[in-house]
Amino acid sequence: MLVGLIVACEIGFWVLLGAGLLARYGLRWPRVSAVLLVSVPLVDLVLLTATVIDLRGGAVASLAHSLAAVYLGFSVAFGHQTIRGADVWIAHRVAHGPAPAKPPRVGPARVRHEWALWRRAVAAWAMACTLLLAAVLLVGDASRTAELSDSIGWLSVTILAWLVAGPVWATRRLGGEPHRVVR
């Protein structure tokens, strides 16, 4: 059931976003657009409430509960940026607004971009881990929340892998190719 709700919330996010942009640019209803776009976080509230009710009702935590926390963390950290990016893209395509800025491909600007993305990812990780820990404490039964505790570990490995593959790699590339030993 919870997996279906996560999928429904993801669909709800995009439906509200699309409806908000349609109201803004297609129908020229700025107030309706504002209400729809401000309503996007309500989808997160529905998912959070359902997850808490499920766990408080005696459910054994599953990967779905962990994914709900990850989804919420991602939504909080990247949601506004996603909405803003979609708004700029639609404004460009439909209302002849300025073209969206593309991420830099090389140089110091690319390194700054990678570090900024990683900081957002850290915010998502922190939110997800906080929600997972709160759920563990809320349930108060380690046998029912083992999946949530395990998820903190794989999330931590993921954020460290992102650090290495993203900003550290970009920073290293900025410094030039590593020196090679010539034999």
Image (tube, helix red, strand yellow):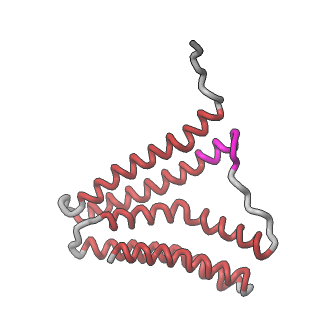
Q: Residue at x 44, y 54 (%)?
A: 125
Specify the farthest residue to the front: 183
Q: Position of residue 163 (x, y in %)?
A: 50, 43
Q: Quadrant of residue 98?
A: bottom right
* Image quadrant where one finds the C terminus: top right
Q: Position of residue 4 (x, y in %)?
A: 38, 76
Q: What secondary structure is the magenta-colored segment mainly?
A: helix
Q: Nearer the viewer, residue 138 or 155?
A: 155
Read off the magenta span: 104-114
Q: Is residue 41 above or below residue 115?
A: below
Q: Is residue 124 above or below residue 93?
A: above
Is residue 53 on the magenta stretch? no
Q: Is residue 176 above or below residue 28?
A: above
Q: For this view, does 150 lie left or right of residue 101?
A: left
Q: Is residue 68 above or below residue 21?
A: above
Q: For this view, does 84 lie left or right of residue 13?
A: right
